[in-house]
């Protein structure tokens, strides 16, 4: 990098395959994106750690390709619509089910338990897909089936991170059906559980929907940070229970992290989960 005293740290390129000019162009775009106003050439150069001449030439090219534009009343630059068009294409082409498909199967084989991909749909969890390990427990939660929000790990995760997570929706709180002896039917108790989910980053279900079946679920975030789905591991109570579930969390979180990378919700080396 040129004059990197105040700019971004030099990138590591052990294989020597990165193109420096492309790196510089991205540095400039990211510098403008981080600012809350338009920037002049000198300020962009300083913040990006580049020479003014290099920055000027890069900006001219980016402007010609509609990635940046100059304010009409100044020589300052801001991002332009070509970036929005590219971003919109990415969003349109990212399909949660398609992205998650291989990870559902891998997680099922790795853990020996069934895996589920779910989304919030009105007042229930809708299962989009599943993965199943050989010899695993057959479940009723096939793709296309629905489950109650308050009595499944999937539903609790989705509800905890939804705008209705404060349980102000009477359509939900008035219909906390009891399925087993452990089903939570008290809004106050469920509210406490949802608070724990947001604190811990995962939800559990101990035979609350179906006797003999337990599950643990984690959220899936997209490029905006919004929770758009959940990844769930489910199995018999003899194998997944309050004493054993934490052993499965690393694999479950790792699979969710890989899915989120494709959704734009995580960076490849982000281990925040």
Image (spheres, rainbow, N blue to C red):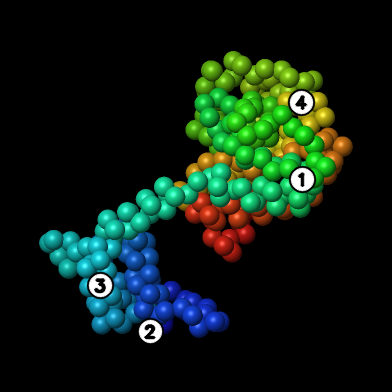
Image quadrant containing the N terminus: bottom left
User: In the depicted view, which residue is nearer to us: 34 or 18?
Assistant: 18
Q: CA distance from mark 4 to mark 3?
A: 61 Å
Q: Is residue 152 left or right of residue 49?
A: right
Q: Earlier in the sequence, mark 2 or mark 3?
A: 2
- The residue identified by callout 4 is 210
Q: Indicate which disc, 4 or 3, sits on the residue closer to the N terminus.
A: 3
Please tell me how crowded label 1 is: few (under 14), some (14-19), or many (20+) other residues with Cα within 10 Å. some
The disc at residue 133 is 1
Residue mark closest to the camera, 1 vs 3? 1
Q: Provide the residue designation for mark 3.
A: 61
Q: Is residue 200 visible?
A: no
Q: Position of residue 258 (x, y in %)?
A: 60, 55
* 55 w.r.t. 142: above or below: below
**Image point (36%, 78%), residue name:** 21
SS class, disc 3: helix
Identify the secondary structure beneath mark 2. Answer: loop
Mark positioned earlier in the residue sequence (4 or 2) = 2
First in sequence: mark 4 vs mark 1: 1
Q: CA distance from mark 4 to mark 2?
A: 62 Å
Question: x and y percent of residue 108 in the render?
Answer: 73, 47
Residue 2 is labelled as: 2
Say what secondary structure mark 4 lies in: loop
């Amino acid at each position: 990098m040129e004059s990197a005293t105040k700019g971004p740290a030099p990138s590591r390129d052990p294989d020597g395959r990165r193109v420096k000019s492309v790196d510089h162009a991205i540095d400039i775009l990211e510098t403008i994106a981080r600012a809350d106003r338009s920037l002049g050439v000198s300020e962009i150069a300083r913040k990006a750690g580049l020479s003014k001449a290099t920055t000027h030439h890069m900006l001219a090219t980016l402007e010609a390709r509609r990635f940046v534009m100059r304010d009409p009343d100044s020589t300052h630059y801001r991002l332009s619509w070509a970036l929005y068009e590219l971003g919109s294409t990415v969003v349109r082409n990212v399909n949660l089910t398609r992205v998650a498909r291989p990870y559902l199967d891998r997680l099922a084989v790795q853990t020996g338990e069934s895996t589920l991909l779910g989304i919030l749909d009105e007042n229930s969890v809708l299962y989009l897909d599943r993965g199943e390990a050989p010899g695993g427990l057959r479940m009723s939660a096939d793709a296309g089936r629905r489950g109650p929000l308050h009595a499944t790990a999937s539903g609790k995760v989705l509800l905890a991170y939804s705008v209705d997570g404060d349980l102000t929706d009477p359509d939900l709180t008035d219909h906390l059906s009891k399925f087993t002896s452990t089903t939570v039917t008290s809004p106050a108790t469920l509210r406490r559980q949802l608070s724990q989910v947001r604190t811990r980053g995962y939800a559990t279900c101990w035979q609350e929907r179906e006797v003999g079946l337990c599950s643990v679920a984690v959220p899936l975030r997209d490029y905006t940070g919004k929770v758009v789905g959940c990844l769930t591991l489910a199995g018999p109570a003899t194998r997944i229970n309050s004493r054993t579930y934490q052993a499965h969390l690393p694999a479950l979180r790792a699979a969710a992290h890989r899915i989120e990378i494709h959704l734009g919700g995580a960076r490849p080396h982000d281990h925040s989960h």
